[in-house]
Amino acid sequence: MGVSVEASEQVFSTMCALDAAGFNSDESTLAEMPSRLALRTDAAVVPGFLLWDASRRKYRLRFEPAVEISRTSNEEADVRENTQRFTRVIEDFIREHPDQWLWVHKRWKTRPPGDPPMYSF
């Protein structure tokens, strides 16, 4: 048994990113590495989220069901589809628990070619 923790929202380089819909946007740059890893290793993608439980004054780790992985004969289409599926899981969590989400860096600094920057600083 192995454990892998992925920051699937994090784009470390434009070399491992794709432009796909996310967070009410037609296009934003999303990390594709979790999708490629799942496709190449047949690994399950099981989303996990930390939730602050104020009554216990502790964090709880909540796992969601494994995300169904698209596997067709078109790897690039599968990467795009799976990346969007993973993003939807994150979006759903944030919409359900907006008070639990804190992002401390420029999440959308990597933009599709020709798009204006999201930040003025």
Image (spheres, helix red, strand yellow):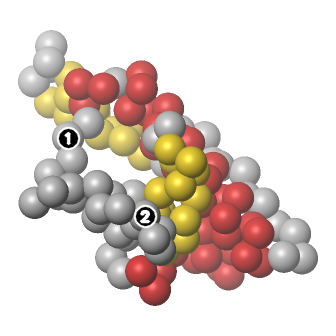
Residue pushed farthest right? 73
Q: Is residue 75 above or below residue 6?
A: below
Residue pushed farthest top? 55
Q: State left or right for residue 74 relative to residue 76.
A: right
* Disc 2 residue crowd, few under 14, some 14–19, many 20+, Cα 10 Å: few
Q: Nearer the viewer, mark 1 or mark 2?
A: 2
Q: How far across and how far down the image is residue 61, in percent?
A: 33, 39
Query: Can you tell which mark lies on residue 16?
Result: none
Q: Residue at x 33, y 76 (%)?
A: 12
Q: State left or right for residue 99 relative to residue 95.
A: left
Q: Is residue 34 something one can see in this rendering?
A: no
Q: Is residue 82 above or below residue 42?
A: above
Q: Which residue lies under the disc numbered 1? A: 102
- Dot 1: element: loop
Q: How far across and how far down the image is residue 50, in percent?
A: 29, 39
Q: How far across and how far down the image is residue 70, in percent?
A: 78, 60
- Dot 2: element: loop
Q: Which residue lies under the disc numbered 2? A: 115
* Quadrant in which the C terminus appears: bottom left
Q: Is residue 103 above or below residue 2?
A: above
Q: Residue at x 14, y 30 (%)?
A: 58
Q: Give the CA distance from mark 1 to mark 2.
A: 25 Å
> What kind of residue is marked 1?
Leu
> What kind of residue is marked 2?
Asp
Q: How far across and how far down the image is residue 55, in percent?
A: 15, 13
Q: Nearer the viewer, residue 35 or 3?
A: 35
Q: Residue at x 55, y 65 (%)?
A: 19
